[in-house]
Image (cartoon, rainbow, N blue to C red):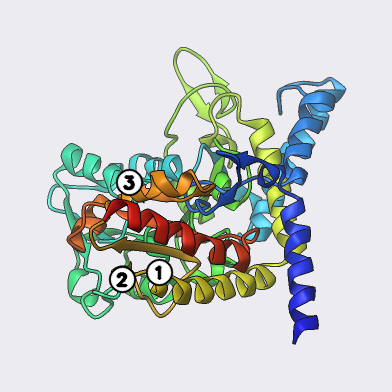
Amino acid sequence: MSAVMNKNEQQVQQWRDDFPILARQVHGKPLVYFDSAATAQRPRQVLAAMDDFYQNHNANVHRGVHSISGEATDLFEAARRKLATHINAASEREVIFTRGSTEAINLVAQAYLRPLLQAGDEILISHMEHHSNIVPWQLLREQTGAVLKVIPVTDQGELDTQALPGLINARTKMLGLVHVSNALGSINPVREVCALARQHGVTTIIDGAQALPHLQVDVQALGCDFYSLSGHKMYGPTGIGALYGREQLLEDMPPWQGGGEMIRTVSFEETVWNDLPAKFEAGTPNIAGAIGLGAAVDYLQGIGLDAIAAHEQDLLSHASAALQQIDGLRIIGQARNKVSVISFVIDGVHPHDLGTIVDHHGFAIRTGHHCTMPLIKRFGLPATARASLALYNTRNEIDRFIPALKQACDMLR
């Protein structure tokens, strides 16, 4: 058994060595980064890919006839193909680069749904959505007179699937659902929900920002119409993400933003739109970001999502048990199927104070509502503390976290 553990520890240490920031200190203590659900760290391979672009291939894409423009275009489009393969899109034409999941959802709201909505039509989302999958639909509600409905969440932090069928009707035009909750770690039954929506002719968009770092995602198997993702959650750069959309839907949608690249011809009388995916990528894109995202895909595939999931599930189990050593600690969200995200509260201790004190021990955790204010209020709380564990975290870090929490509790109670 010890030999197996040593082998596993050596493997994780190899992964950790890829992340330069993990070698630094905070307040004189080794950094322990438990905030990957907010943004993951970047491995050397991603940083190197972006550096290589800027140092050796920096040029605008698609527009130049000179050599380095061609090189930049090849790298940019290779990244798109990598991502399309990673999520099993039917074609790279179905992958639109965006600034992140938030922009992807707004694109669908404004370019796809708004032209179709009439007053009284309904949009269905869940109680566990990130603000980025709530606010765009509220804006549509104000613009069109549509109705926003909410699927409840159980006390365990799971989607109330029994309530779902009664919320879908002939006026339902869109169902938006988070794949993995950033606040609770809950993994939603996306395939089943999409199948039910499809039976009723309802279009689906899945917020996959928190799923891609932990799960192997197959958009065709899930049966969704749209799927959004953010690069910085999956060890890639900030400011880059993507929207997957079924090709026919994207073909039928009008553009969202106008400018260069998304046009075929322009005159003062008429503009003809470009083909997919360029139709939705107005202006100079985040070229280095896309290349970095492609490198992040390579990195994840090199390790293997199964290996990552196994390690993170071990961390989740170990941390969930270890946290029970803290008197008055309660984990919020006990879904049967979840990733390595743990939100918790401690009696008599405000999460913000807790986060400040453990930071002085080198532990980076998140405190607050996690951009899910309705969900946190649903549990009757102003905020929680959240430890989100990733492939580079270890059991040892968790074991060192418990004394820091105990010391913080002694100070604050």
Callout 3: helix, strand or loop? Answer: helix
Query: Is tag 2's residue or tag 3's residue first in the polypeptide sequence?
Result: 2
Q: In this view, does 362 lie above or below 216?
A: above
Q: How far apart are marks 1 and 3 (CA)?
A: 26 Å
Question: Is any part of residue 301 visible from this angle?
Answer: yes
Considering depth in this image, is 255 or 15 the residue closer to the camera?
Answer: 15
Helix, strand or loop for disc 2: loop
Q: Residue 157 carries which label?
A: 2
- Residue at image x 19%, y 56%? 377
Q: Is mark 1 on a helix, strand or loop?
A: loop
Number of the front mark, 2 or 3: 3
As drawn, is 162 to the left or to the right of 14?
A: left
Quarter of the image that includes the C terminus:
bottom left
- The residues bearing labels 2 and 1 have C-alpha atoms spaced at a distance of 7 Å
Q: Nearer the viewer, residue 268 or 406?
A: 406
* Label 3: few (<14), some (14–19) or many (≥20) C-alpha neighbours in 10 Å: some
From this viewpoint, which residue is outermost toward the bottom? 1
Q: Mark 1 points at which residue?
A: 186
- Left or right: residue 380 compared with residue 277: left
Q: In this view, does 167 lie to the left or right of 217?
A: left
Upstream in the sequence, badge 1 or badge 3?
1
With respect to residue 332, does 368 lie above or below?
above
Which of the two marks, 1 or 3, is nearer to us in this view? 3
Three-letter amino acid code at the position of disc 3: Asp
Percent position of residue 155, x then y: 24, 74
Q: Which amino acid does label 2 sit on?
A: Gly
User: Which residue bears the numbered disc 3?
Assistant: 353
> Looking at the rendering, which quadrant does residue 168 occupy?
bottom left
Q: Which of marks 2 and 1 is nearer the N terminus?
A: 2
Q: Are marks 2 and 1 in contact (CB under 8 Å)?
A: yes
